[in-house]
Amino acid sequence: MTHQPAIPTLTAADPQIAELIEAEATRQHDKVRLIASENYVSQAVLEATGSVLTNKYSEGYSGKRYYEGQQLVDPIEDLAVERAKSVFGVEHANVQPYSGSPANLAAYLAFAEPGDTVLGMALPAGGHLTHGWSVSATGKWFNAVRYGVRKEDGRLDLDEVRDLARQHRPKLIFAGGTAIPRTIDFAAFAEIAREVDAVLVADIAHIAGLVAGGAHPSPVGHAQVITTTTHKTLRGPRGAMIMSDADHAKAVDKAVFPGLQGGPHNHTTAAIAVALGEASKPDFREYAHGIVANAKALAEALLERGFDLVSGGTDNHLLLVDLTSKHIGGKPAAKALDAAGIELNYNTVPFDPRKPFDPSGIRIGTAAVTTRGLKPQHQPKIAEWIDRAISAAATDDAKALHTIAGEVKELLAAYPVPGYRD
Ligand SMILES: *Cc1c(COP(=O)(O)O)cnc(C)c1O
């Protein structure tokens, strides 16, 4: 048995699924997990997620539900909401969105009408699909205008944001993204939003844990609405929250339910409460700063090895590596790295000349390895493995990749993770 909590009943009832879950626990244990949107949750979060709360329907909000039997779900949701308010210092929190994408949809439903103009970061520049990208419902149902980054330094171009906002007068402005390695200036976004009378939505899905731990400036007091996932740097279950000031609270709640969703996922709500409890402890601050210290150390080690980083480095948990000078595409590089026990994703880089399905870059995040207990002194080793794996990919050297995977597994054996026991 390797999975923790143990799954003996599942193993007896459905060995096929149980075996795959066991293998996934082992896989997560044996690899350096560098996908910037992923993490390892605590065993307490895993236990809440796997609880009987999944049996309960609770449409509505605490004290105003449509079904009976909410004696225990109400205080659970109340705790999640109170903890979110306290951890982030917000006036209102809705913990019911099923995930980050529905949370963003709720922001559209609350504050815009179909056909209205919205302004968000372009996907290839580092934005999210739900910030108005063309293939997303948000790009199809709204008139989406997109900003990017500067060609010279790969950084967000606030002059462009201001110009586009003045020209197009959007109802909503999204600040945030999936591949932004630098600090986001929420105060500057707020000034632009105020000037054009737009609602500013800070989407902190990636950096929520850093914000909670004081390792990234908070959008609170700048953005009227804040959306976030709970499963990235915040280290909770797969889920999302929408936070807001008091003025926007009612519209947010109405949009989530009954506007967009039915019953909340109560097991997820409980697990969010548990994760927020963890995030309120002093050692979470240390954790958040540790994520950034690891990212900076890894950036430095990669730069020393001649890798090009978009924007030249990082301020947060995330690095975007442009592999053009290494003469390999992001996709073959990511595949080779996976074979070498290093899990990450291929990613477009700003102004990418290659196709989205085989772009020029890879994205790296340090939240999961920090949870695991790796420190800045381990980062040169990770950079060395990445360098060797990418060289091995160029010569199709499967043996070298296998050797690296062995070294990865050996180092990680000393760093236990929740969800797995030998
Ligand atoms: C991950 C992410 C989302 C979407 O989250 P899902 O839970 O995958 O739907 C939205 N916005 C940003 C910026 C993200 O990084």
Image (cartoon, rainbow, N blue to C red):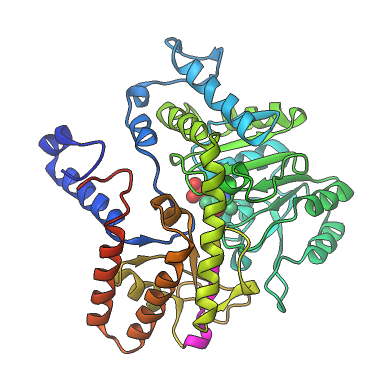
Can you say whether 330 is above or below 223 in the image?
below
Which one is nearer the viewer's eye here, 301 or 37? 301
Horizontal placement of 7 versus 136: left or right? left
Quadrant housing the N terminus: top left
Question: Residue 350: which quarter of the image?
Answer: bottom right
Residue range (magenta):
319-326
Can you say whether 229 is above or below 349 in the image?
above
Which one is nearer the viewer's eye here, 414 or 345? 414
Let me know if residue 188 is in the magenta part.
no
Q: Residue furthest right?
A: 195
What percent of the width, then of the height, locates residue 142?
68, 51
What percent of the width, then of the height, locates residue 148?
70, 67
Residue at (65% x, 63% y) in the render: 122
Residue at (71% x, 77% y) in the render: 151
Residue 224 in sight from this viewpoint: yes
Numbered disc total: 0
Can you say whether 274 is above or below 4 in the image?
above
Horizontal placement of 153 versus 401: left or right? right
Q: Residue furthest left?
A: 12
Q: Residue furthest front?
A: 377
